[in-house]
Image: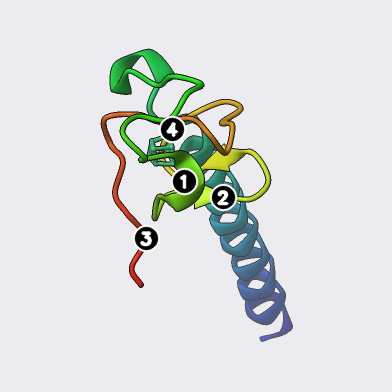
Amino acid sequence: MQDNTSRRAILRTGLMAAAGATLAAGAARAQDEKIAQELVQYQNQPKEGQQCNKCAQWVEPNACKIVAGVIVPQGYCVAYAPKEG
Ligand code: SF4
């Protein structure tokens, strides 16, 4: 009886460790899955009043939710989407 209990505990611990590793790998992959700046024609200047810090994808102080790398507030790319409001 006690053997079954400890075997179950070991199994449960192993499954939890595997689940944790899978989640960590998923988070790392999400970081890698941002779009390369070249693919969205990112530039360091605004275009016709459109710029990164007015975009819904903008992340202070110098990043973007969907485009990789350092993004300046005055930058622009073809994925620009104006913030609501
Ligand atoms: S314009 Fe492009 S790079 Fe800039 S915040 Fe929006 S999606 Fe990101």
Q: Residues within 10 Å of mark 3 (few under 14, many from 20)?
A: few
**Tag 1: amino acid:** Lys
Q: Position of residue 69 (x, y in %)?
A: 57, 25
| Structural crowding at the residue carrying mark 2, measured as other residues with C-alpha within 10 Å and reported as few (<14), some (14–19) or many (≥20) | some
Which is more toward the observer, 50 or 10? 50
Where residue 40 sits, quadrant-wise, is top left
Quadrant containing the N terminus in the rendered view: bottom right
Q: CA distance from mark 1 to mark 3?
A: 13 Å
Please, what secondary structure does the residue beneath circle 2 have? strand
* Mark toward the start of the polypeptide (2 vs 4): 2
In the image, residue 74 sits, relative to residue 16, either above or below, namely above
- Residues under labels 2 and 3: Cα distance? 12 Å
Q: Are marks 4 and 1 in contact (CB under 8 Å)?
A: yes
For disc 2, does the CB lie below 8 Å from ligand 1?
A: yes
| Residue 81 placement, left or right of 19 | left
Residue type highlighted by circle 4? Val
Q: Position of residue 2 (x, y in %)?
A: 73, 83
Q: Is mark 1 within 8 Å of ligand 1?
A: yes
Residue located beneath label 2 in the image: 59
Tags 3 and 4 touching, CB below 8 Å: no
Disc 4 under 8 Å from ligand 1? The reply is yes
Residue linked to disc 4: 67
Residue beneath disc 1: 65
* Residue 83 image label: 3
Picture residue at 43% right of the left edge, 32% below the top: 67
Q: Amino acid at mark 3?
A: Lys
Q: CA distance from mark 4 to mark 1?
A: 6 Å
Q: Classify 10 Å Cα crowding around label 1: few (below 14), some (14-19), many (20 and above).
A: few
Q: Residue at x 68, y 45 (%)?
A: 61
Residues tagged 2 and 1 counted as in contact (Cβ below 8 A): yes
